[in-house]
Amino acid sequence: MACLLLAACGREQEPQPTPEPIVVEPGGTVVFATEPPAATTEPERALLVGIVGPETGADADYGQAIYRGAQLAVEKLNDTGGIGGQALQLVHYDNAGEAGQTMDIVQHLIDQKVMAIISAPTGWATFGPTHLTNDSDTILISVGSRRRIARSGDYIFQLSLTDEIATDRIIRYSRDQLRFKRFALVTTSDYDYSLDVAASFKKALGRHGGELVAEADTYDTYTGQHDVEAVVTHILGVAGSLDAVIFTGSPAEAAALILG
C-alpha cells in the first residue's frame, strides 16, 4: 500500500479542463442530472437451514423429533427438484437445553447466512434466540411452541396452532366426523396449563353441542398427591355413557390413564 501511495504521489498531475460557466436567463431553470445511488441488496443466501434443539438430556425427544421431521421434509423436497433446481441443505446442532450453548449455535448459524433456523419448542431453543435472529433478519421457526412468540418480531414464527384453535378443531372433528357427543374431562389441577386447555375444551364443547358427562382430576388437593387409579375407577363407572375422554395433563399420566 505504501508503494502504491508513493507511486501515485510521484505521478505528474494532468491538467483538468476548466468547466464552462452556466448562464441562466431570467425566469429560466436549470436541471442537474445526477446518478441514482446504487441499490444495496443483501447477497443471496445459500439454501441452508439450521436446526437447534436438545438432542441429549431430559428433553432430547423434542430435539430429535424436530430433526427427523425436518430431515424427511428436506429429502422429499430435494427428490422433487429442490428449490429452483438446487438441493436444500440441512445442518443440526445439539444445544443440550443450555442457554449459552443455544446462543453460540444460533450466532454460528447466522454467521453462515442460513435461510432459516428451526427450533424445538423447548425453552432456550425457542425463546433465547428470538432477538438475535430478528435483529439479523434471519427467520426463526419454532415447531410446536404453544406460546405467542411471533410477537417478538417480523422474522419470528411458530409452526403450531393456538390452544383455542386446536381445541375447537378437535371437538368439531369429534362431533362432525366421529359423531361423538358425550365427553369426560380429566385435568391435573396442580398444572396450570392443564387447567387453561381444559377451559378451552369446555368452550369448544359448548360451541359444537358436546355434552360434558363427567369431570375428574388426577391431583388430590387433600393429600397433595397424584392418584390416576382413582380417576380410572371414576371413568370406568360412567363409561357406558361416554363417547370419549379428554385429558389435559402430563404425558406420563396420559399413558397411565390409557393403560388403566
Image (spheres, helix red, strand yellow):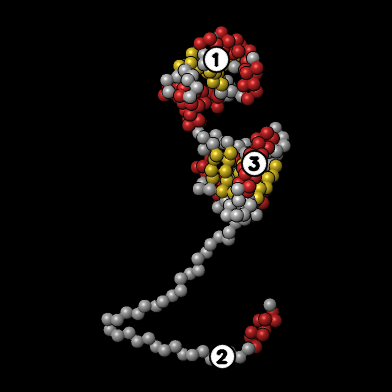
**Residue at screen point 47% across, 20% down:** 179
Name the kind of residue labelled 3 in the image. Answer: Leu
Q: Residue 14 — which label?
A: 2
Name the kind of residue labelled 2 in the image. Answer: Glu
Q: Are marks 2 and 1 in contact (CB under 8 Å)?
A: no
Q: Is residue 189 visible?
A: no
SS at badge 3: helix
> How far, Cα to Cα, is label 3 from label 2?
67 Å
**Residue at screen point 70% across, 81% down:** 3
Q: Say which of 174 and 43 sits in front.
A: 174
Q: Say which of 128 and 204 sits in front.
A: 204
Q: Residue 216 — which label?
A: 1
Q: Residue furthest right?
A: 56
SS at badge 1: strand
**Residue at screen point 45% across, 19% down:** 210
Name the kind of residue labelled 1 in the image. Answer: Ala
Q: How many marks?
A: 3
Q: Where is the C terminus found, in terms of image quarters? A: top right
Identify the residue under disc 3. Answer: 72
Q: Where is the N terminus found, in terms of image quarters? A: bottom right
> How far, Cα to Cα, is label 2 from label 1?
95 Å
